[in-house]
Image (cartoon, helix red, strand yellow):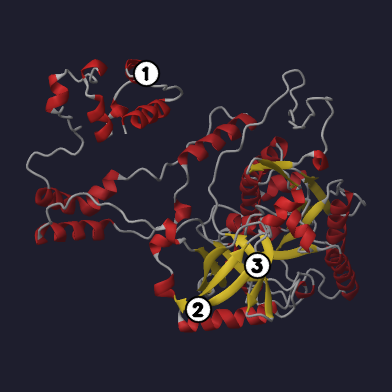
Amino acid sequence: MTERFYADDEGDGSEEEETLGIGKFGGRDSVIFAIDCCREMFELDGENSEDTPFNRIIEAIHDMYLNKIITSDKDLHGIIFFGTKKNNSSSDFSNIFVWQKLDIPSVKSITELRDMQKINAADFDTQFGNESRKQMSEVFWESLNMLSATSYKLAAKSLIVFTWNDNPHFGDNNAKKRAKTKAQDLHDHDVDIQVMSFNKNFKYEPFYKDIISDPDSEDPFNENPIDCIQNLYSFLLKKCTKQRTLSRIPLFIGDDIEISVGVYTVARRTTKTAAISIDSSSNQEAKRSTNFIDTNTGEILLPSDIKLMQTWAGKEIVFEKEEIQNMRKIGKHGLHVLGFKPRSAAVKAWYHVRNSQFIYPNEERVKGSTTLFHALLVKCLAKDVVAICSYTARPNSPPRCVALLPQDEEINPETSEQITPPGFYVIFLPFADDIREVDFEPEQPKPTNEQIEAAENLVRKLKFTYNPESFDNPAIQTHYKNLEAMALEKEQPDKIDDHTKPDTEIIDKKAGAYIQAFKQAVFPPGYDPLKKATKHKSSSTASKGGKKPKEDMVDVKEYVSQGKLGKLTVQGLKEICRKYNIKGTGKKADIIQAIEDHFT
């Protein structure tokens, strides 16, 4: 099983996780890009391509920076060129040029990347020079120096090397040993090393197999390096995205068997970044703080000074904060398997109550979890069943009934890229009160066979394979394009393509005849769907000129019995209260309730 599931870190680092010893996340993610600047990296990438491998790498990093500013604006990134004549490094290494230091993406760094996207070999040689000699040990050393020099706390550290030559130290065993030693130093500092190449003949075995992280894993990227970066931007975004669990919880099978799993968020609504308050005098971000103050003494209350109270049977019952927290703990937290049911019977489309989650085994807490998890997944897939579980996400959260829907791993045969990861989807099941009977409209005339056939032909012709990644939110895209234009000082924001709008030309070309056939079969002659329907006034309303009934002309008892008091104005309801000596105050609903109580 190969883990290729990437999730956001929503909810990481909760107090409950720290208390339980599950692990607390903190710090920033950091990524260093080391780019080989040999001659081959500046040759056109294929016969029909107008870009070189170097240009594609810079363009993908530029797009990733723009994405990171929106999604993770605190993460750190740096870029190293190696194989250059000029050098600019902390230890004065030759043939290594630190082009961008490890820092947060800024307007300056993005502008530099944008200007570098179309550079050719001659211009690059003028600015940086080209040197075939290179020492990978020095590249790794400089990367470690950059990571060690930062003052920020780092949660995840990555080094992504883009190179062409799969054996840079051919015949020089001492250089190989030095490079492997420095690579091991990076691994000892928890730095993840990835090596990518546009060279179709690139192999990991001569040198880089002992350099990359997890060389023995069944990773399709290690088998075919060129295929994995057909969409380089998507690849970099995955590699540089926080691979963190929402939480790590136990999965209990029976009373004695426990598996450790990580919970991931599958989908989350994309929203605009929240506005921040700015101090008008200093133009700095204003931070808010809330304190509880004793009204008698004016002193600030500590959390231990605050009590919770509830009046019960005329007595004031005081609770400590710890007592309230303990009241919320119902059973042990985690997933408890209650049994198994056929998938078709347990999971229905209309059972959706909230977004599902995803679980994958975690070996840090319970060794052997991956093996048992894989066996459970294989059996559930073979028997087409789901596991019904009681799910308590946090110790102080209420339990929910969920179904673990198995999913097998799917690999793209052309690119060897993983499409779907193996694991279980956590489907939240509704309670009995969540399922309600729906009152349908009065029975409508049934369609004829001709109308049904026309509708089927139309729907069949307009069907297409839906991919959510093909439809961006135009409002959010416009918002960020405007911010980008302001930050990068562009004359005007880049145009966006609103793919949510229907393409009438393609629809007409593809299904124009079926649309006309459907209209003729269903709608009356001359029907215009774009024409607004005119509302016909009822006879009672029309006779009164459309005005609301006057309060002095209505039969109050009749209005109460038929529930029509809501049609009267607040002023009219107050007139009725004065007329019948009814104490009606407050909102309109309160006045209506007072009148109904008087006459019932």
399 lies above or below 541 = below
Tell me, yes or no, whether the two marked residues, 2 and 3, touch with CB atoms within 8 Å. Answer: no
Left or right of 122: which side holds 508? left
Residue 545, visible in the rendered structure? yes
Which of label 1 and label 2 is nearer to you? 1
Q: Position of residue 185 (x, y in %)?
A: 88, 66
Left or right of 369: which side holds 80? right
N-terminal label among 1 and 2: 2
Tell me, yes or no, whether the two marked residues, 1 and 2, touch with CB atoms within 8 Å. Answer: no
Which of label 3 and label 1 is nearer to you? 1
Q: Name the residue tied to disc 1.
A: 581
Mark 2, residues whose alpha carbon is within 10 Å: few (<14), some, or many (≥20)? some
Q: Name the residue tied to disc 2.
A: 340
Q: Quadrant of residue 426?
A: bottom right
Q: Position of residue 84 (x, y in %)?
A: 80, 53
Q: Mark 2: which secondary structure?
A: strand
Q: Position of residue 71 (x, y in %)?
A: 63, 46
Q: How many angstroms separate mark 2 from mark 3 (CA)?
A: 17 Å
42 lies above or below 347 = above
| Amino acid type, callout 1 | Asn
The residue positioned 38% from the left and 31% from the top of the image is: 593
Q: Mark 3: which secondary structure?
A: strand
Total tally of numbered discs in the picture: 3
| Amino acid type, callout 3 | Gly
Q: Name the residue tied to disc 3.
A: 334
| Amino acid type, callout 2 | Phe
Q: How many angstroms separate mark 3 from mark 1 (CA)?
A: 60 Å
Q: Position of residue 455 (x, y in %)?
A: 19, 57
Which one is nearer the viewer's eye here, 521 or 130? 521
